[in-house]
Amino acid sequence: MNIFTSPDVIQEFTRVYLAIFYTVVALFYTVRIITLKRSTGMERVYHGPFMSPNWWHHKVFGVFRVTIWMVCLVRWLSPSTDSYLGIFPAISSSWSLMLGDILLTFGFAWTIWTHFSLGRQWTSGISQIGPTKLVTQGVYHYSRNPIYIGVLVSQFGFVLALPSWFSVLCFAIGVTTILRQTREEERHLAQIFPKEYPVYQAQVPRWL
């Protein structure tokens, strides 16, 4: 049997990969937020007023991201944890796991690229005093929410890399939160740019 398509080998590789992947994701966002805040002297993450939709979306998304990270670390150290996640054996094939790993990586790489294409203009959440400029160039010429596309691709990859009730629940939470946050951000941008944003909306799709 080819070692690269052996179910046991791929499963163990994916177990380790998921733990490392989400650790890298956590480190990337932490470093990115700190370095941008230091270089610009401004906050990069805006939670919004207490109990507002933006506040709830950030809290829910933050909790579920940390939960995924912790679960992946624990199941690496203790494989028996899988028995509590509701694994779907029928779709836990080598090809499914590998495709999940690829989508995870592609989605995150796309997200990083989009982050850096925004440069110092990147923020998370809705700032009551900004943004001061509507970004429409680069990848934003083709999609109004390219970063969220990358996140959704990665989240779907997680379902394939860890096919289980746990990953399906995380995917449902992630999709719901992103869709709701997208609508909040679009309403905010329409208020900040009452002339430019409606034109941009008409010319560029929300997703692809």
Image: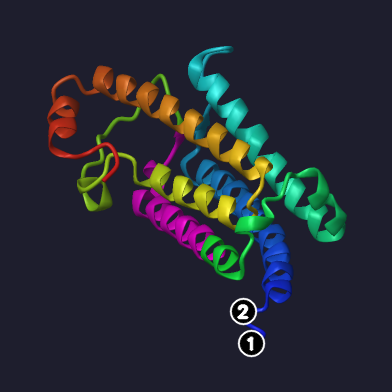
Residue that appears at 56% across and 32% down: 173
Q: Is 36 one of the magenta-colored residues?
A: no
Which SS does the magenta portion mostly show? helix
43 relative position to 126: left or right: right
User: Which residue lies under the disc numbered 1?
Assistant: 2
Mark 2: amino acid? Thr
Q: CA distance from mark 1 to mark 2?
A: 6 Å
Q: Which numbered disc covers residue 26?
A: none
- Disc 1 residue type (three-letter): Asn
- Point out residue 168 in the picture as x, y percentages from the top left corner: 59, 41
Mark 2, residue position: 5
Q: Nearer the viewer, residue 194 or 110?
A: 110
Decide: is 108 above or below 50. below
Q: Secondary structure at mark 1?
A: loop
Camera-side residue of 86 and 110: 86
Q: Is residue 17 visible?
A: yes
- Marks 1 and 2 in Cβ contact (< 8 Å): yes
The magenta segment is: 101-124
Apparent side of residue 173 relative to residue 109 in the rendered image (left or right): right
Q: Residue 96 sits in which quadrant?
A: bottom right
Question: Residue 42 placed where, x, y %?
Answer: 49, 34
Q: Residue furthest front?
A: 90
Front residue of 160 and 62? 160
Bin the neighbour count of mark 1 within 10 Å (Cα to Cα): few under 14, some 14-19, many 20 and up. Answer: few
Q: Residue at x 26, y 44 (%)?
A: 143
**Which part of the image, by quadrant, shows the N terminus?**
bottom right
Residue 80: x %, y % from top left: 87, 55
Furthest residue to the bottom? 1
Q: Report the residue at 83% width, 50% height from top.
A: 81
Magenta stretch holds residue 103: yes
Residue 101, position as x, y percentages in the image: 56, 64
